Image (tube, rainbow, N blue to C red):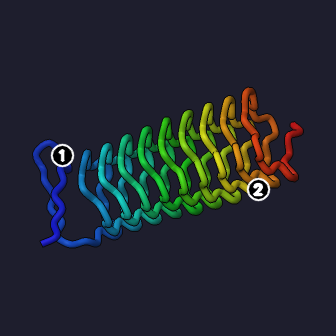
Amino acid sequence: MNSLQVMAGAQESLVFTNGSLIQLALPYVNLHGANLMGRDLRQANLFGANLQEANLIAASLRQANLRQSTLNRARLQRCNLSEADLTAAHGNEADFQRATFTETEAQGIYLYRSNLSQATLVQGHFQQAYAPEASFVAIEGAGLDLRWATLIQARFNYARLPGANLRGANLSRADFTGADLRGADLRGAHLQGVIFHQTCLDGVNFDD
């Protein structure tokens, strides 16, 4: 039997005995350290859930509600978060390597020192994200919206960011070595100490 047992409150335990948890509704549930590897959680309502240190490797959270959830130090490699809502979620020091964030809503998300290397963030909405020292190495980020984000010392080495919106972002000491920023919007961005070594800057808008 493929079962999952989680604590939903001080005295309550919930057990699920199949792989699919589509449209599961467990707002504010405590899933700290839970093993959800490969689980199908499409359209799940996990508003405010505690997923700290959870194993979500290769899970599907497509169109899930993860607003204000806690994902600190969680493992989300190859997780599908397309069209999910991660507004104001906490994902500090989480591992999102090769995860998919296509058209994901993630305004105000916390990603301090998180690993998003090789992730797909095409048309993702990450306005006002807090992601100092995060790794965006080799991401696919065409049309990514990072307006007003805090990206101090973030690493964008070899990232593909054509048409990305970085207007007003704090990019102090960020590294864009080998990145593709063609047609990106950097108006009003803080660029102190930024590394643009071998970066494609064709058509970039720096004028405020």
Which numbered tag is attached to residue 9?
A: 1
Question: Which quarter of the image is occupied by the C terminus?
Answer: top right
Q: Residues within 10 Å of mark 1 (few under 14, many from 20)?
A: few
Relative to residue 202, is residue 68 depicted above or below?
A: above
Q: Residues within 10 Å of mark 2 (few under 14, many from 20)?
A: many
- Where is residue 50? Give x, y as percent: 31, 45
For mark 2, what is the residue? 163
Relative to residue 174, is residue 39 depicted above or below?
A: below
Tell me which residue sits at (79%, 42%) in the image: 186
Disc 1, SS: loop
The amino acid at mark 1 is Gly
Q: In the displayed structure, does residue 1 sit left or right of residue 44?
A: left
Task: State if disc 1 and disc 2 touch (CB < 8 Å).
Answer: no
- Where is residue 61? Give x, y as percent: 41, 62
- For this orientation, the residue located farthest to the top is 192
Which numbered tag is attached to residue 19?
A: none
Disc 2, SS: loop
Tell me which residue sits at (67%, 30%) in the image: 173
- Quarter occupied by residue 44: bottom left
Question: Which quarter of the image is occupied by the N terminus?
Answer: bottom left
Whichever of callouts 2 and 1 sits on the residue coming sooner in the sequence is 1
